[in-house]
């Protein structure tokens, strides 16, 4: 048996040996060796020589096998050979279907978004199994080869330190989202020497979202210009300064300006942190780091609620001037983030975009725990996938192009609608105003109700990870929307009964809010972001997610501004509009949202394209054809 330069194993006891031809060309010679080499056969087809070694039982089986090999020896296409050979046990990989691990691994790494998205891990595992079946022909009871190869990329100590440093920004975002909730009454009484009116307070609370809109719009070009590390460092310094300004505010205008600037910083954080984590993490850990990012945000929300409202007999900082210290605590997290920036490395993907590939390779090896003088095929494949995606993203399209292209119009509409449903479901009305809402509902301890909401939010985020691994996106969206609708109805019935029949149903009201928050975290919370990334290829993804993010911030601003007035006008029926919206969300998700888990981008877009062009009853409208200049690649994601 001839030997060669490269040897690979397919996990089934077969080995592939590649060697150059005598004339120095790259003709491939693949040798597949079983654990006991009882049988040998050779096939020549075109420019490829394939030698098969396979264990057989009995002389008759051996003769039959050789006859089959001889019958197809003159075939010119190696694919025809693999189709004609039907072994008794397992299909034999050929040089056509299994040249090496590089191509399928690179395809998977190119296809998974460079974002740390909550719930993405299950999809990556499903795609690795699918691509292993297609490329390496393993059976269901065997461990996928691609999965085995990716398991080499574990979470290292250096990666852990970097992730911890960056997640300070996510905690601060959650903290500043909810920090005004529990001390609302104290701040309104003491901020400007007179009580702040309802509309001015709604401006102070909701203007945070306008800042978030500005920050999320400005962040992408800055991230591409100065780099991820520098952006997060400057953003941390800026956030520290404006948080101190907020703590020293002495007027409504000063407080509103500080909240606007804090929102701008947090808006940049919501773009930078998941992007950076996705670019430094191995492909198998991007979903896990997305979950950590989401978990850090909800922990920040809970921390603000506990410090403001107190717990276990402690009264908290919800007094004058304690609320100023409460607002200044956010500066502790941003200062810690700045100090820890010395451990943060630049994004390897950004370095590749700047043609600094040597430095990118060095940092990747450091993050993966590989010595500087060691070679790693996985590292090279990662760098190749980053370079290919960077080339694709240079052709980034505009929002107008997304709308005009029939292939992208329907997915974009789905992304926009899910963002609207997410915010108009009223979830931020809970995180902004739950304390005042429980007071109006005459709940015995409104601070306890708010802290319970934050605690359930944290627990539901952890449970949602397992649910997203087991169920599909579509099923969870429907479940989440229906559950929120039922919770809103329970809450409304208990509020009406308490007001009209003098019943003490405070704990039922809290239960309605808690189940409402729980069902949100199961679906409408994380899935709109995940599914928007899954509906687009690398060229369109950044534009689509940026536009959907802007819609999300605008909807968040509308809810923050209008809920106090809506609550005053509707009274016990405040959650009826949210029940109607979540009911429509359930119908929309069931009727129009495609299932994306474990499916390729082409399969998803083909289904949506057919659905969006399906002729209506009684008409003969023909489906629009795909533009000739649009390029579709079979990307998983």
Image (cartoon, grey):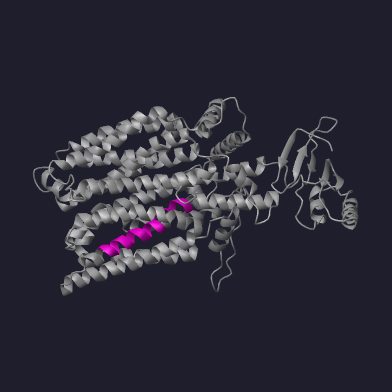
In the image, taking residue 538 as reference, residue 264 lies left or right, namely: left
Between 142 and 113, the residue placed more toward the observer is 142
Q: Nearer the viewer, residue 426 or 358?
A: 358
Q: Residue furthest left?
A: 193
Expressed as whole percent of the image width and height from the top left, the position of residue 355 reads: 55, 28
Which residue occupies 53% across, 44% down? 284
- Quick one: quadrant of the N terminus? top right
Examine the image and state in which quarter residue 274 appears: top left
Check the image and report above or below for 595 versus 553: below
Q: Is residue 435 left or right of residue 2?
A: left
- Left or right: 202 in relation to 415: left
Q: Nearer the viewer, residue 193 or 462?
A: 462
Q: Position of residue 34 (x, y in %)?
A: 78, 46
The image quarter in which residue 516 lies: bottom left
The answer to whether residue 316 is seen in the rendering is: yes
Image position, residue 251 (x, y; %): 15, 40
**Magenta residues, as a range?**
510-531
Q: Is residue 433 magenta?
A: no
Q: Is residue 209 visible?
A: no
Query: What percent of the width, then of the height, locates residue 530?
Result: 47, 51
């Amino acid at each position: 048996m001839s030997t060669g330069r490269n040897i690979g194993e397919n996990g089934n006891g077969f080995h592939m040996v590649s060697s150059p031809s005598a004339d120095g060309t790259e003709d491939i010679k693949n040798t597949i060796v079983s654990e006991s080499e009882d049988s040998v056969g050779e096939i020549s087809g075109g420019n490829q020589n394939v030698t098969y070694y396979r264990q057989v039982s009995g002389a008759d089986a051996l003769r039959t096998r050789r006859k089959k090999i001889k019958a197809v020896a003159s075939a010119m296409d190696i694919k025809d050979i693999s189709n004609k050979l039907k072994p008794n046990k397992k299909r034999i990989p050929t040089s056509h279907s299994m040249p090496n691990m590089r191509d399928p691994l690179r395809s998977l790494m190119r296809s998974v978004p460079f974002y740390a998205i909550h719930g993405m891990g299950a999809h990556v595992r499903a795609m690795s199994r699918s691509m292993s079946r297609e490329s390496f022909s393993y059976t269901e009871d065997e461990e996928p080869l691609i999965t085995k190869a990716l398991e080499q990329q574990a979470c290292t100590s250096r990666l852990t330190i970097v992730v911890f440093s960056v997640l300070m920004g996510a905690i601060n975002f959650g903290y500043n989202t909810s920090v005004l909730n529990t001390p609302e009454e104290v701040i309104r009484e003491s901020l400007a020497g007179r009580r702040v009116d309802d509309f001015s307070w709604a401006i102070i609370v909701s203007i945070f979202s306008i800042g978030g809109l500005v920050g999320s719009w400005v962040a992408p070009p800055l991230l591409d210009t100065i780099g991820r590390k520098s952006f997060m460092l400057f953003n941390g310094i800026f956030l520290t300064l404006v948080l101190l300004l907020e703590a020293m505010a002495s007027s409504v205008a000063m407080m509103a300006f500080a909240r606007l600037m804090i929102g701008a910083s947090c808006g940049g954080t919501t773009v930078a942190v998941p992007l950076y984590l996705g670019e430094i993490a191995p492909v198998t850990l991007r979903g896990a780091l997305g979950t950590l990012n989401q978990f850090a945000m909800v922990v920040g929300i809970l921390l603000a609620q506990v410090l403001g409202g107190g717990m276990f007999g402690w009264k908290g900082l919800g007094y004058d001037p304690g609320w100023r210290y409460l607002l200044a605590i956010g500066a502790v997290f941003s200062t810690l983030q700045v100090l820890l920036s010395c451990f943060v490395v630049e994004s390897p993907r950004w370095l590749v975009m700047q043609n600094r590939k040597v430095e990118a390779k060095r940092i990747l090896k450091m993050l993966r725990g590989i010595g500087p003088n060691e070679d790693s095929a996985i590292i090279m494949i990662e760098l190749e996938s980053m370079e290919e995606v960077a080339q694709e993203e240079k052709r980034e399209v505009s929002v107008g192009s997304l709308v005009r292209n029939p292939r992208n119009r329907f997915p974009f509409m789905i992304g926009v609608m899910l963002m609207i449903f997410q915010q108009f479901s009223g979830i931020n009305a809970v995180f902004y105003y739950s304390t005042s809402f429980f007071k109006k509902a005459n709940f015995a301890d409104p601070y306890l109700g708010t802290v319970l909401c934050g605690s359930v939010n944290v627990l539901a985020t952890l449970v949602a990870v397992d649910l997203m691994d087991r169920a599909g996106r579509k099923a969870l969206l429907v479940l989440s929307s229906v559950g929120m609708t039922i919770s809103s109805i329970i809450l409304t019935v208990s509020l009406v009964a308490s007001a009209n029949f003098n019943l003490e149903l405070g704990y039922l009201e809290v239960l309605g809010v808690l189940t409402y928050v729980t069902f949100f975290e199961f679906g409408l919370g994380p899935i709109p972001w995940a599914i928007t990334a899954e509906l687009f290829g690398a060229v369109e993804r950044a534009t689509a997610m940026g536009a959907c993010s802007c819609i999300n911030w605008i909807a968040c601003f509308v809810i923050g501004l209008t809920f106090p007035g809506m609550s005053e006008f509707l009274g016990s029926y405040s959650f009826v509009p949210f029940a109607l919206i979540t009911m429509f969300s359930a119908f929309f998700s069931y009727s129009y949202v495609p299932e994306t888990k474990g499916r390729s981008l082409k399969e998803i877009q083909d289904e949506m394209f057919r659905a969006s062009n399906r002729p209506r009853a009684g008409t003969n409208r023909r489906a629009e054809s795909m533009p000739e200049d649009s390029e579709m690649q079979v990307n998983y994601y």
